[in-house]
Image (tube, helix red, strand yellow):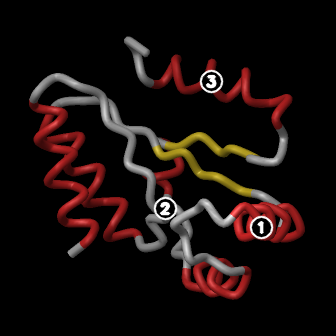
Amino acid sequence: ATYQRLHALAATILRAGFPVVLDATYLKAEQRQAAAAVANETGVPFLILDCHAPEAVIASWLEQRQAENSDPSDATLEVVKAQQASREPLDAQELANSTRIDTQEASGMDQVIDQIRQRLPGL
């Protein structure tokens, strides 16, 4: 239901002429296909940002969030591990419509931004 609502809102916003970023885990191919369908139906480009980070980096981020006590997320390392274990890999079509991001490497972000701009004209 959460993804259905997210996609319905995205479709409304896209039809109004605004860009949309769907920030969710998208662990299942069916969820990603539904997001791609929204882009296709509204005639906008679609790009998956396939984010990766080493477990130690993720654990550090989670510890920092919990210490700051300002993040609404209830994610723990156990939750992240369970998500990663149930993640369905990107298929060939999804890989063709994706850009891999190693999120712990800030030095590579300029390159990622350039890749996104090449894939999504008008940004």
Badge 3 marks a residue whose secondary structure is: helix
Which numbered dot is residue 12?
Answer: none
| Label whose residue precedes the other's in the sequence (2 or 1) | 1
Find the distance from the CA under tag 3 to the CA under tag 2: 23 Å
Q: Position of residue 52 (x, y in %)?
A: 71, 56
The amino acid on which the numbered mark 1 sits, given as a three-letter code, is Ala
From the viewer's perspective, is the residue at label 1 or at label 3 nearer? 1
Assess disc 2: are there few (<14), some (14-19) or many (≥20) residues with their C-alpha within 10 Å of its C-alpha: few
Residue 84 appears left or right of 21: right
| Label whose residue precedes the other's in the sequence (3 or 2) | 2
The amino acid on which the numbered mark 2 sits, given as a three-letter code, is Asp
Determine whether 71 is above or below 39 in the image.
below
Give the residue number, with chain letter if any, for mark 1. Answer: 67
Query: Relative to the observer, which residue lies in front, 107 or 87?
Result: 107
Find the distance from the CA under tag 1 to the CA under tag 3: 30 Å
Identify the image quadrant of the N terminus: bottom left
Determine whether 75 is above or below 54 in the image.
below
Outermost residue on the right side: it is 56
Give the residue number, with chain letter if any, for mark 3. Answer: 113
Find the distance from the CA under tag 2 to the CA under tag 1: 37 Å
Give the residue number, with chain letter if any, for mark 2. Answer: 91
The residue that appears at 48% across and 71% down in the rendered structure is: 27
Query: Relative to the observer, which residue lies in front, 101 or 57?
Result: 57
